[in-house]
Image (cartoon, rainbow, N blue to C red):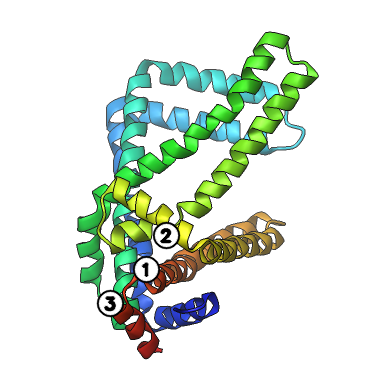
Amino acid sequence: MERIGEVLRNGAYTWKQNPILCAPFVLDTFAQFLFFALVFAGLVAVIGTDLFMAIGSGVSEIMHASQTPGEPSLDAAEAMVEVYQLAVPFIRVFIVALIIMGIGSALIRTFFEAGAVGMAKNATMAGTTRMNDLLWYGRRSTISLFLANILILLIFLAGIVFLVPGILLLDASDGNGVAMAAFAIGIILWIGYMIILSIGLAPVTYALVIDNKGPIEGIEKGWKFFSSHKLDVFLMWVVMFAIAMLVFTVGQIFFIHPVTTVIWQFVATLINICILMPLITVWWTRLYLSRSAGRRLRQALRNKH
């Protein structure tokens, strides 16, 4: 069984030998852009170009007023009232558009996520992968992964029960010290609950796609994998967190001027979709395969490197 350092090193080698692994993330970006453009085009067709531009102008004014130091809040408040008055007659249209955007975007992202894991699996096991792998795994696992992600979201939201005692005490005691303390402890517990879940459920996507499981089976197998390999999963999660913090820290250097900010955002996007996301996907895939696969597969992984 490969150690975590070997997983990272060999996974990086697999990524370097297969630059096509960035294809799912590049295509996802373009597909999301086209999808949102189509939804906005449909929205404009329903409410009219003039009204859409007026609402957009109002939202832009609100954002500018909120980000400008020393700007009077009255302008922002007036813009909010104006946008509200313009949008109210079409509130159902906006709600439907938001629902379509949310579900459609999630399905697109899930399709390419499943395809990316499938490509990473084949690249890890066979040394190479093709675009056909993206389409095949995407078609096979999108719905199951989409439903699993919904269940995981509900599991995360279930942590709101930690806030209930504090909310009840605040409502009953008009905000005394005990109630505030209970509410603060509830927030801390909820954050801890989400951190534990984010680590424990991290392997779910890979268990579901690689082993072709349904939503509930995928969640169960992903959590079981975490339970059997807690240290490995935690260390991989720490690596992901460290990478995210490094990118964030470097980004702060460029946030000193609007021009450098725009340049960094573009460069960071390219780094993310072309390097980091494919590499991270290969790392998690290799970790899952090296820990959960049979003896023959583990031998194949050792022989490749």
* Mark number displayed over residue 129: 3
Q: CA distance from mark 1 to mark 2?
A: 8 Å
Task: Name the residue nearer the viewer: 295 or 16.
Answer: 295
* Residue 81 seen anywhere in this rendered image of the structure: yes
**How far apart are labels 3 and 1 at the CA level?**
21 Å
Whether residue 263 is visible: no
Question: Residue, x 32% and y 84% (percent of image)?
Answer: 300
- Write down the quadrant of residue 91 in the picture: top left
The tag earlier along the polypeptide, 3 or 1, is 3
The picture quadrant where one finds residue 31 is bottom left
Nearer the viewer's eye, disc 3 or disc 1? 1
- What residue is rendered at 68% in x and 56% in y? 255
Question: Image height check: is 199 above or below 183?
Answer: below
Residue at the image position 26 percent from the left and 55 percent from the top: 213
Contact, CB < 8 Å: mark 1 with mark 2?
yes
Q: Within 10 Å of the Cα at label 2, are there few (<14), some (14-19), or many (20+) other Cα atoms?
A: many
Please state which amino acid type lies under the numbered disc 2: Phe
| Quadrant showing the N terminus | bottom left
What quarter of the picture does the C terminus occupy? bottom left
Residue 268 vs residue 45: left or right?
right
Q: Residue 24 location, x and y as percent?
A: 33, 64
> Residue 106: horizontal and vertical position, in percent?
35, 45
Q: Secondary structure at mark 2?
A: helix
Left of 195 or right of it: where is 180? right
Q: Are marks 2 and 3 in contact (CB under 8 Å)?
A: no
Residue 93: x %, y % from top left: 32, 24
The answer to whether the residue labelled 3 contacts the one labelled 1, judged by CB atoms less than 8 Å apart, is: no
* The one of 112 and 183 positioned closer to us in this rendering: 183
- Location of mark 2 (residue): 225
Q: Which mark is residue 292?
A: 1
